[in-house]
Amino acid sequence: MSTAQDHLDPAAVTALYGEHIDELRALLTGVLRNAEMVSEALQSTFARLVEEGSASRDETRKGWLFTVAMNEALQLKRRLKRDGELVRRLAGQNGGAAELWGPSPEDEVERRETVERVRRGLEALPENQRTVVRMRLDEGLTFAVIAERLQIPLGTVLTRMRGALGRLAETLKSEQS
């Protein structure tokens, strides 16, 4: 438990703030790249200075302050990443509710129906377009590699892919109606 004697003198905290705030802000801005997070890290850093700064020696206090600031920044980044991942899952990204609780029966039926519509749409494409789509999606090939393998110009591959996507969009749109 800390006592008033364990804390730095308010005048010393004010002096350290005035002396180092610009450098600390620059450091934290480089790490966090967000003004609100920089302000939060600075506030936490100086709160720790008030609470624990007296444990550091005068000659090493600047280093202590920068170390605390960096640790606060890294802790904020970790918390932001963790919170962001949770929000994305809850908001429906990366599987959403399905990832947390499994897909609902309705979602599973809809997914199967969509897969079937896409499969039918792919089968309805002209052979030259279907070949490009399958090489791109199934084999993960770049358009340049597809052009090389099929021994056709890159522009032709891109045109076939664009045409295939247009036809698939139309097919899926008409089947939903």
Image (spheres, rainbow, N blue to C red):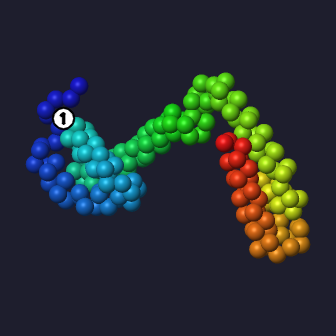
Q: Is residue 71 left or right of residue 168?
A: left
Q: Nearer the viewer, residue 55 or 35?
A: 35
Residue kind at label 1, given as amino acid type: Asp
Q: Nearer the viewer, residue 88 or 6?
A: 88
* Residue holding disc 1: 6
Residue 150, image quadrant: bottom right
Q: Is residue 173 visible?
A: yes
Rendered residue at 16%/48% (across/down):
13
User: Residue lying furthest left in this view?
Assistant: 11
Rendered residue at 43%/46% (across/down):
77
Residue 121 place in picture, x, y as percent: 79, 49
Residue 22, image quadrant: bottom left
Question: Height in image: 151 above or below 170?
Answer: below
Residue 85 place in picture, x, y as percent: 51, 39
Residue 15 place in picture, x, y as percent: 14, 54
Rendered residue at 76%/68% (across/down):
159
Rendered residue at 16%/29% (across/down):
3
